[in-house]
Image (cartoon, rainbow, N blue to C red):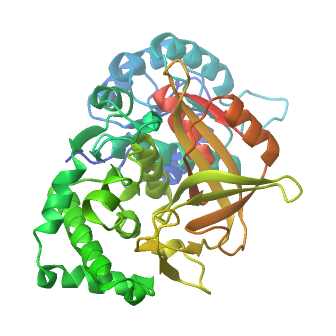
């Protein structure tokens, strides 16, 4: 499998102050190497079109960092675009090292204007831009976020997501087409009927499922209080889902839940999805495929489980939004004082489901891959703090104090026709997701 690669392309001409340029060349390369293991760096600054062409033949990049090490005319950027117009790109302008009334040492900024014109002529997607020296904090942060976003885009190209069953009536917002997922995100979609996994689960013996039951008991609190038949049936489902995911190399899944697992199996799938989320497989309920993909992106950026749920309550005085769902949150998200408590479904009164408030976090990102009424993809982004709050309702819940006005978020998303499912990511990764949207040429609504 191809390894993710960042290509550093420092272009210029030899008529400027090469001692200053050379020092920044080395510092820039070192900075990039700190953010990615596989950075292709030329052996010297690319101060002619011929040297640039030779380097372009050596690389197979997933992100290009094009830097005006000195001034360079538009022919340099045009050559890069001719080879790699579809590759995400960050244009980096260097600050003048000295302003002393004497010689202009780099003239990098003028070169950026020449490069940007050529890039815009070739690329339909927005490119990223940063101005500054390699030791400046804003430069470090922008480059790191751009590398992380490009790596996320690369990982999506290797993602297989499963749709297990169909969305319930009235929940079509989560339904995905395989061609659209592949064309827009590079993601492969596999579909399977929920009854196939139900039938597989029914075929297992108690002994075969015992390891799965024991694994769940280590993560959950009070599973032994669930009726024996439901606990064993949960273990059967857990085994069926886990083996399906492993055998088919599934990285994320969207599972139908009600009414089938209550009516046809007698035990909900909620706790199974919680276990998969704990194991790093992004798993949404109500067959929300774009919800599962949103979870996957957050999990890849943070290497932690994400919360999936509905906005169910607004507190204008506290400036908070409460997110809730029936009980699929990963056990690792539970508050320390309660742990991942097991209960029963709030409407059907059948278990096991999860019953807890989620742990606090100083920084969270609220995220959703949505669609406009016309069908175009769009990203929703907001940031805030997950408060130290107990369980708000039966099921699992999380209270977020938003950085922007919570009331405005609720009014805007309702009036804008946004979907009712959102992902709360533990960490501030809004910048990375915004850059990813640029790379995908998808519009953003950020709060």
Give 353 or 362, whichever is nearer the viewer. 353
Location of residue 48 by image quarter = top left
- Residue 237 in view here: yes
Q: Is residue 55 above or below residue 326?
A: above
Q: Position of residue 85 (x, y in %)?
A: 39, 20
Give 230 or 98, whichever is nearer the viewer. 230
Q: Residue at x 41, y 53 (%)?
A: 285
Q: Quadrant of the C terminus?
A: top right
- Kindly give the residue lying farthest to the top in the view shown: 121
Residue 30 falls left or right of residue 324 = left
Q: Position of residue 43 (x, y in %)?
A: 37, 41
Q: Residue at x 35, y 43 (%)?
A: 156
Location of residue 40 by image quarter = top left
Residue 36 falls left or right of residue 322 = left
Q: Position of residue 329 (x, y in %)?
A: 49, 66
Q: Is residue 238 above or below residue 336?
A: above
Give 121 or 409, whichever is nearer the viewer. 409
Residue 436 falls left or right of residue 269 = right
Q: Residue at x 47, y 19 (%)?
A: 77
- Residue 90 in view here: no
Residue 184 falls left or right of residue 212 = right
Q: Is residue 125 above or below residue 88?
A: above
């Amino acid at each position: 499998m191809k390894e993710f690669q960042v290509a550093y392309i420092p272009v210029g001409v030899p008529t400027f102050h090469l001692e200053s340029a050379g020092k920044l060349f080395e510092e820039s390369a070192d900075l990039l190497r700190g953010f990615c293991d596989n950075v292709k760096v030329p052996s010297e600054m690319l101060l002619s079109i011929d040297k640039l062409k030779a380097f372009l033949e050596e690389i197979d990049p997933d992100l290009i960092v094009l830097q005006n090490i000195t001034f360079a005319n538009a022919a340099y950027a045009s050559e890069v675009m001719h080879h790699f117009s579809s590759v995400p790109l960050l244009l980096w302008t260097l600050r003048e090292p000295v302003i002393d009334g004497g010689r202009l040492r780099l003239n990098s900024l003028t070169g950026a204007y020449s490069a940007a014109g050529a890039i815009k002529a070739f690329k339909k997607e927005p490119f990223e831009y940063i101005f500054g020296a390699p030791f400046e904090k804003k430069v470090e942060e922008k480059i790191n976020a751009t590398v992380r976003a490009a790596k996320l885009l690369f990982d999506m190209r290797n993602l297989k997501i499963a749709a297990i069953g169909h969305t319930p009536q009235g929940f079509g917002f989560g339904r995905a087409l395989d061609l659209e997922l592949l064309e827009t995100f590079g993601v492969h979609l596999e579909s399977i009927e929920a009854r196939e996994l139900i039938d597989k689960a029914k075929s297992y013996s108690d002994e075969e499922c015992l390891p799965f039951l024991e694994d769940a008991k280590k993560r959950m609190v009070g599973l032994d209080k669930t009726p024996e038949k439901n606990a064993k049936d949960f273990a059967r489902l857990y085994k069926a889902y886990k083996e399906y995911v492993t055998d088919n190399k599934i990285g994320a899944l969207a599972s139908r839940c009600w009414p089938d697992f209550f009516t046809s199996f007698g035990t909900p799938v909620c706790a199974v999805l919680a276990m998969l989320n704990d194991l790093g497989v992004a798993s949404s309920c109500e067959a929300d495929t774009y919800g599962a993909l949103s979870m996957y992106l957050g999990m890849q950026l943070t290497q932690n489980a994400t919360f999936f749920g509905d906005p169910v309550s607004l507190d204008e005085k506290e400036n908070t939004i409460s997110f809730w769902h029936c009980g699929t949150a990963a056990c690792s998200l539970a508050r320390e004082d309660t742990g991942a408590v097991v209960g029963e479904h709030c409407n059907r009164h059948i278990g096991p489901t999860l019953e807890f408030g989620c742990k606090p976090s100083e920084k969270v990102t609220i995220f959703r891959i949505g669609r406009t009424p016309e069908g175009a993809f769009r990203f929703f982004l907001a940031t805030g703090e997950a408060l130290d709050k107990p369980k708000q309702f039966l099921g699992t819940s999380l209270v977020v104090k938003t950085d922007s006005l919570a009331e405005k978020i609720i009014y805007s998303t309702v009036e804008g026709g946004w979907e009712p499912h959102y992902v709360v990511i533990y960490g501030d990764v809004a910048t990375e997701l915004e850059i990813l949207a640029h790379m995908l040429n998808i519009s953003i609504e950020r709060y």
